[in-house]
Structure formats: C-alpha cells, structure tokens
Image (spheres, rainbow, N blue to C red):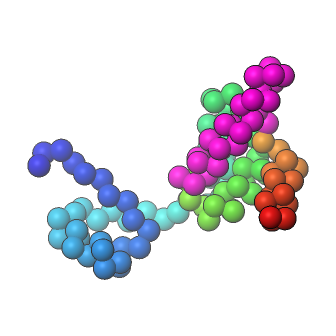
Amino acid sequence: SKVPIICICNDRQSQKIRSLVPYCLDLKYRRPVKMVIARRAVEIGAIEGMKVETNAAEAIAESCGNDIRQVLNCLQMWASTNKKHKKKSGQTTDITYKALKERQNFINKD
C-alpha cells in the first residue's frame, strides 16, 4: 500500500506488536516532561478559549502519567462539562489548581 499506516503503542515488546515489527519503521520517542506538556496545554487552552493555570496543567499532566493524549482528553472533558455554565454566564472556562483539586476530592469520595 502506498498509504502509510501509523501505529502507536506503549509497549513495543507486546506479543500483539511483534508481528508488525518486520513491516514497520520503528521510531522511538520518550514521553515529554510535565512542564513541556503543561506549557502546551496552557497554549491549547488559550486557543480554545479556556484559561488554564500552569500549576493546574502540571497537575493534570502528572495525573495522566505525562501522556499528552490523555491530557488533551482531560481538557476536552473539562471544557464540555463547563459548557452549560459558560453559556449562562458568558465567561471563559477556567481550569484552576483549586478547582482541579476540588474535582479530584469529589471523585475520590465516590
């Protein structure tokens, strides 16, 4: 096929992946550190109309194991849960460290 297929995995040694190895160009990447992820999350949040505190973004990155895909998913979920409030008040969606900890405590109660 002339159309490239991109496969992403976290465990290169997995039995499921071994059959693909002979047909792949193996590119290895290290996970970025939480400060790099946090900086990018703040930038993405600003582009999407969200105000994300740096320390909150770092906490999200740390809780997601420095996985940028999961961080983006968390930002998306945070924005969608605040969408109703945003429409009513006309404010931007803010992600503060305090609000993040309150949500984590609420989740941990259940």
Left or right side of 98 for 67:
left
Q: Which residues are magenta?
A: 69-94
Q: Is residue 8 visible?
A: yes
Main SS, magenta region, reads: helix
Left or right: residue 104 versus residue 26 is: right
Along the line of sight, which residue is nearer the eye, 4 or 25? 4
User: Can you see residue 92?
Assistant: no
Residue nearer the viewer, 22 or 17: 17
Q: Looking at the image, which residue is at 63% across and 29% down?
A: 47
Q: Quadrant of residue 2?
A: top left
Of all residues shown, which one is farthest toward the front? Answer: 110
- x and y, in percent, of residue 59 in the image: 75, 57
Q: Front-most of 78 and 25?
A: 78
24 relative to 103, above or below:
below
Kindly give the residue lying farthest to the left in the view shown.
1
- Would you say 31 lies left or right of 43 here? left
Q: Is residue 3 above or below residue 109?
A: above
Residue 63 placement: quadrant: bottom right
Where in the figure is residue 20, as x and y percent of width and height? 22, 68
Point 21% across, 73% down: residue: 19
Residue at x 30%, y 53% (from the top left corner): 6
Check the image and report above or below for 38 versus 65.
Answer: above
